[in-house]
Image: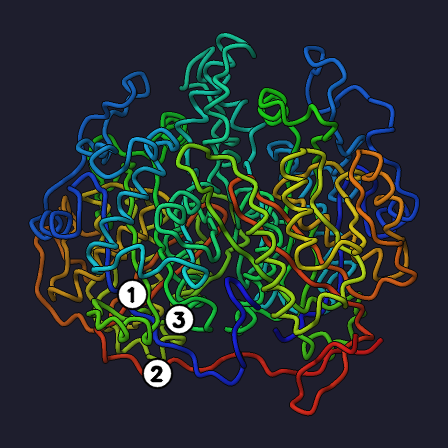
Amino acid sequence: MIPLLVTGLGVVSPVGIGREAFFASMAAPRLLQTEALYPAETFDAAMYPNATIAEVRGFDPAKYLGDKGLRTLDRLTKLLVVAARLAMHDAGFKKDNVYVQGSADRIGLCCSNAYGSLEAITELDRVATLEDARYINPAKFPNTVANSAAGYVSIWEDIRALNVSVSDGNCGALDAVACADVFFDTDRADAILVGGGEAMSEALYLAFHSLGALEDGTRLGEGAALIVVEPAEQAQSRGARVMAEIIGYGTAFKGPSTESPLVHASSDAMERAIQFALADAEIEPSAIDVVASSLSGVRAFDDAELAGIRRVLGEGVCVAAPKMVLGETLGASGAMGMAAALAWLEGAAAPAPLVAHCSKQGRELGGPRPERVRTVLVTSMGFYGNASAVVMRRPDLGTESPNGDARSTS
Amino acid sequence: MSLSSPRTSPSARPPSRVFITGVGVISSLGLGKEEFFDALEQGKSGISNVESFDPSALGREHAGEVKNFRPRDHLTAAESRRMGRCSAMALAAARLAMKDAALTPDQIRGPRTAVVIGTTMGEAGLLEKLEHAWITRGNGAIKRSLIPKYGSTLLPIHIARAMGAEGMVLTLPGACAAGNYAIGFAADLIRSGRADVVVTGAAELLQELQFSGFVRLAAMALDRCQPFDLNRQGLILGEGAGLLILESEAHMMKRDARPQAEVGGYGLSCDAYHITRPREDAAGSIAAMRHAIETSGLTPADIDFVNAHGTGTRANDLAEARVMRDVFGVRPVPISSVKSMIGHCMGASSALEAVSCVMTIERGVYPPTIGYETPDPECPVALVANVARCGKADVVVNNSLAFGGYNAVTCFARPGVLPPPRNRRRSAAPALAT
């Protein structure tokens, strides 16, 4: 693919809000499994002793957005709008929330989310079930619609070129990168905010808790991360600071071989997604310094993902697990993986401690800590046989080839 | 980028034409394209009393509910067990589209086939069941087996699994414009060489919370939807699924298939104005329609018919009339809203209406807007009022607007009418060195 340049990051995560805070936390990552448990802030967790949650604790959107207009917004919306505001400022499009570069008509949003605003749906369902559907709050009804949070991002940040909501479970935020690439191909925008968000709620926690998906130590998380991507000529023309390049993407789906299961971890899909991403990036497996995997602690899925990674990249590749620090953020998780990759590529943090932790869980992930991270493979494993992968690279590694394409020097 | 399998020399290849070779419909007016469009042509209404829940306390009782759909007529027993009603409608419509395209799963199995589906809420009915049990009877009442079946993510997964598709599986939850988002993006996947075949479209379920929400927004009419009428009272909800098979020209020719229509360009924009209302100046919607026409290589003078979003709400129809004036000027381009017959099927609406557009091209018939009685001077559109009309149908535009300020417009044409798609791919500029 023709590289897309990453020129900004807005992140609201359990380990920090904003690029600098996030990078600082990634430089000294604290493993969730060894962290003290805090009482849940987003819901009354009295019924769930030792609830394994990675919330954005003390989240105060008013600090970033002001006090006005927040009353009817749900948590998912607030997480995403703050991430978008930070991303727009980090990329230099805005200063003091006013456009200083670019224009609203040429900036877009591709935003992943897996489960919608369960908080809003539950609130209205409670009124409808326990009182009367005639009493549900019409001002909050729009929050129940899956694209509502993304729609509010456009309203708050004045982003008009396009606004595309994406849902592919845990893979959605990486798929949003592919959507952006298509939209740049067809000249629909000059820059696109790409990523995703997921908000904690009791309904979300209860679902994963009921399925036993948290028993192996996975901590359900929340947050929002949006990276700003631009074609090179756009970034160059406005003198943007370039944090990284996105040079390849791949995705695959593989259903189970038998009829009955619905939930399904496919190492074949992961293997193919990685193969396609490497081919798209025109690099060899040996060029990958580290994998920002989606290992989360759910054994069957971790095993399948590792198998797929190793079949393509070999036994010795360094595999990191950002979810061990950030929690399982589902529709946002691919974006969190890309944010972690940015920290490593900028030299702000090293992935090694994450590898060490995964090994503690009985998985020998191999791969010495790379001395310098130049190229990162970000992977996402879906719950239903879907998998996606993105290749990110330090911007100074691109060189001009005779035909003008940027090629890897690795 | 490689969505399913790596492309070769992506920037060197001219963009492929994209054709619709099959369509499938599950609707309140019938199953399959012939039954569906026959009824539209005859001005029949699919709107009736809601039976799947009791809405009487809300003061509204009508919807375009699909009453003659039995999943087991279209799905295996195992498939029926695996999925909710929304997915079942989507998969059934996909199978009807495959049959219409004379395609078998063996012909599309593998990584060069993608599935891209639009919806507003996906399996909202399953979530409602889970939440109702939880709210009324506590944590222990939750049926665990239902949990993994919830999520809009699943719609393309179920279809891909049934078809053996192994490329991209993606849901685009673009609210009431979701179908157009899916179809437009699917066409771009093929046009840019990222897939050979895409099973696309949208599905939506009539569900109690959404029904209540539209009532509480004071957006729902009592018993009929009258788009562009002076006395229109609002929308009537509906449900259903419209699926389309999109194929590259090479794939279609290789198997000697007949194209029903060509997919032209599409336009996207976001109002960034209000979460439920369109901009009064309709600027976003105008930009999207202009972009759809331009990216088809056409001008407004080439458009023969517009399928309106036409919800029957005051704000929507005013905005849409403004779009027609701005884009087409004084030329009275025929426009019609099939929502007067099938209701507003939310995420599925623009996909069902895309199928209607394909049939308009096939038959040269504009479906009517029924219930039209009193012209609204503020909506001076050339409406196909009450009775279907024959007319030139070489190029048809499908308009949609949605919650979140989403605007999406697609363009369909009789095969052979559109100019070759332009290669708009950005230049391969060298990456920056810091």
Q: Is residue B323 visible?
A: yes
Can you give x and y, in whole percent of width and height, for residue B219 in the image?
Answer: 35, 36
From the viewer's side, name the closer residue of B402 and B20: B20
- Residue, x 67% and y 40% (percent of image)? A303
- Residue, x 70% and y 14% (percent of image)? A48
Mark 2 Cα-neighbour bin, 10 Å: few <14, some 14–19, many ≥20: some
Q: Sequence-wise, which precedes: disc 1 or disc 3?
A: 3
Q: In which chain is the residue bearing label 3?
A: B
A13 horizontally vs B111: left or right: right
Q: Sequence-wise, which precedes: disc 1 or disc 2?
A: 1
Can you give x and y, in whole percent of width and height, for residue B213 in the image?
Answer: 41, 29
Kindly report the distance in space between the C-alpha atoms of the residues bearing marks 1 and 3.
10 Å
Q: Is residue A254 above or below residue A288?
A: above
Residue labelled with disc 1? B397
Q: In which chain is the residue bearing label 2?
A: B
Residue labelled with disc 3? B290
Kind of element beneath mark 3 = helix
Observer-side mark, 1 or 3, equals 1
Kind of element beneath mark 1 = strand
Q: Is residue B190 above or below residue A358?
A: below
Mark 1 Cα-neighbour bin, 10 Å: few <14, some 14–19, many ≥20: many
Q: Sequence-wise, which precedes: disc 2 or disc 3?
A: 3
A222 horizontally vs B61: left or right: right
Labels 1 and 2 touching (C-beta < 8 A):
no
B179 horizontally vs B426: left or right: left
Kindly report the distance in space between the C-alpha atoms of the residues bearing marks 2 and 3.
18 Å
Residue labelled with disc 2? B420
